[in-house]
Image (tube, rainbow, N blue to C red):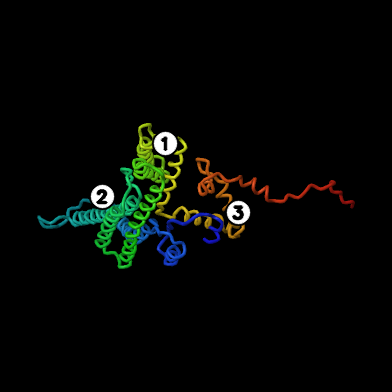
Amino acid sequence: MEQALAGLHCQGIPSTSDEAPGLLAYVEHHLGAHHSPDLFHVQHELSKAVSAPMALKQRAAAKVVATAAARLTRVREHIDNTNDTPEKRGPDRLPKRVASLEQVEQDMEAARQEHQRLSAQREQVLQRIRAIGHAYHFVALERGVRRNGQLIAGDIPQHIDTIRTIAQQEHLSETCLDRLEKAERVVPKMQATIAFVSGYVWQQVSRLALTPPQSHARHAHLIPACSLDRVGATKTVREGESLRVLAERLRTPLFAPEGALGTLSATEQHTLKVQAARLAEVFQRSSANVEGRNGYLSLRNHQLRGLDHPRKRACLTAVHNFFLTRPDGTTAAERFFGQKPRSMFAALLASVALPSAPLSPPRRAVG
């Protein structure tokens, strides 16, 4: 990190990672930044604790249903192929094959109900895990208002309690329950992250020379609208449409002629929008984009294209930061520094000493 930050006038604000003690100590003592828990690791622990064992039970129940269905088919075929010869029995006794068919049908129905019950239980666990990700946002996605740590501290434990109840009903192992408790221990850190981001954003907003209505509009509406845009960009077009519509609904009245920010000049409005987007990015709940890129490079490129060489990785990182653009035409370096840098290839040509042309054409060797 010291080598990466050398010569850059920047400071780490939050650091998002798993709960490894070395990372936590580095962030706290060396960077002096706030540690934000990684949502992926919380959901992954819950998935390994409950969802994975429930999936094993569900597949086992599906096999039982298939076995019972095959047995029922064989019994019905046997009855159809059996001659209707009268059996010697008492007046109140049913044929053995009828009793056997009823038993097989009962077993089939019991296996089917057990499979449906396990499927419903597992689906409920998956919904609760997704609900934790839905709750851990800086802005309430349904209303577009900022959330506070108390709401998150109340919503997320409720989902974890439901998952724990299902795990206890299914008599899962102690290892599964320990994983569940490990994920639950991160909830206070999620609450602290929301409190930290809210305090930091308010501190940055209070430094600007804005009137109280303008400051409130930026803090309560403009920054949440930018947060909704960020979340909507991570979803599909259909799933993110409602978020983009809500963000536009929050943002449009602010810059109307009679709005709180409508009296500002076009340059001031643009500056506020850029700063609001930057403050919305302070809340980071996952490092999946970084880990996903590293994993993809390791899987597809490192061994196949020689990316294990540091110089080649450094070159490709420079291309990624200064040359590749997003749909809006900005590079990673432009978004980081806040201004458009020089052309990367022009800078390379200016720094490379090209060999001069020969004074005369090379002579052909006489053989």
Return the residue at label 1: 264
Task: Name the residue furthest top.
Answer: 257
Left or right, 48 with respect to 106, comes to: right
- At label 2, counting other C-alpha atoms closer than 10 Å, the crowd grade (few under 14, some 14-19, many 20 or more) is few
- Left or right: residue 85 compared with residue 286: left
Q: Is residue 233 above or below residue 119?
A: above
Residue tagged by mark 3? 315
Q: Residues within 10 Å of mark 3 (few under 14, many from 20)?
A: few
For marks 2 and 1 on the same chain, the one whose residue lies earlier in the sequence = 2
Q: Tally the marks.
A: 3
Percent position (x, y) of residue 248?
38, 37
Disc 3 secondary structure class: helix
- Residue 122 visible? The answer is no
Q: Nearer the viewer, mark 3 or mark 1?
A: 1
Quick one: 341 or 330, which is closer to the camera? Answer: 341
Question: How far apart are the two marked residues, 2 and 1, measured between alpha carbons?
Answer: 86 Å
Asked if disc 3 and disc 2 are in contact, CB closer than 8 Å, the reply is no
**Residue type at numbered disc 2:** Asp
Instruction: Looking at this view, name the residue that lies furthest to the left.
Output: 91
Horizontal and vertical percent for residue 228?
38, 44
Q: Could you say where residue 77 lies in the image, as x and y percent from the top left?
A: 28, 51
> Disc 3 and disc 2: Cα gap in Å?
75 Å
* Mark closer to the chain start, 3 or 1: 1
Q: Disc 1 on helix, strand or loop? A: loop
Q: Is residue 335 above or below residue 308?
A: above
Specify the amino acid type for callout 1.
Leu
Say if residue 334 shows up in the picture.
yes
Q: Residues within 10 Å of mark 1 (few under 14, many from 20)?
A: some
At label 3, which amino acid type do we have?
Cys
Q: Position of residue 238 (x, y in %)?
A: 39, 40
**Res. 80 mark:** 2
